[in-house]
Image (spheres, rainbow, N blue to C red):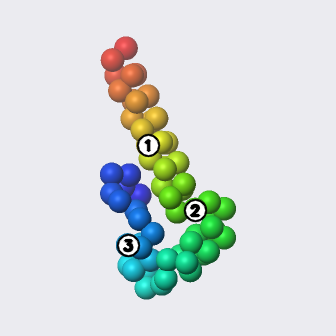
Amino acid sequence: MTPALEYDAPTVAQELGMSVSKLNRVFRAMYAASLHSYVQDKRLECGAKAAHFFYLNFL
């Protein structure tokens, strides 16, 4: 996953050839989270790793 990219449901659904409602159902069943909250969590994880990396390099 590239956190800088936009992962909006309509675009992802179109790329996968399914409706937004089906994407949301399938995604929630697989990951127990909405696409939006999953992407937010991954971006936060990536940001935390980057902050930690930069912090360690400035010590």
Look at mark 3 in the image and give the residue it sits on.
11
Look at mark 2 in the image and give the residue it sits on.
34
Please report the residue visible at 48 percent of the width from the left and 84 percent of the height from the top.
Answer: 18
Q: Secondary structure at mark 3?
A: helix
Q: Mark 1 to mark 3: distance in Å?
A: 22 Å
Please report the residue visible at 40 percent of the width from the left and 30 percent of the height from the top.
Answer: 51
Front in this rendered view, residue 7 or 49: 7
- Amino acid type, residue under disc 2 in the picture: Ser
Farthest top residue in view: 59
- Amino acid type, residue under disc 1 in the picture: Cys
Look at mark 1 in the image and give the residue it sits on.
46
Q: How many marks?
A: 3
Please report the residue visible at 39 percent of the width from the left and 22 percent of the height from the top.
Answer: 55
* Residue 25 coordinates in the image, percent (x, y): 61, 74
Front in this rendered view, residue 16 or 55: 16
Quarter of the C terminus within the rendering: top left
* Residue 3 coordinates in the image, percent (x, y): 38, 52
Please report the residue visible at 43 percent of the width from the left and 28 percent of the height from the top.
Answer: 52
Q: Earlier in the sequence, mark 3 or mark 2?
A: 3
Q: Secondary structure at mark 1?
A: helix
Quadrant housing residue 37? bottom right
Q: Earlier in the sequence, mark 2 or mark 1?
A: 2
Q: Mark 2 to mark 1: distance in Å?
A: 18 Å
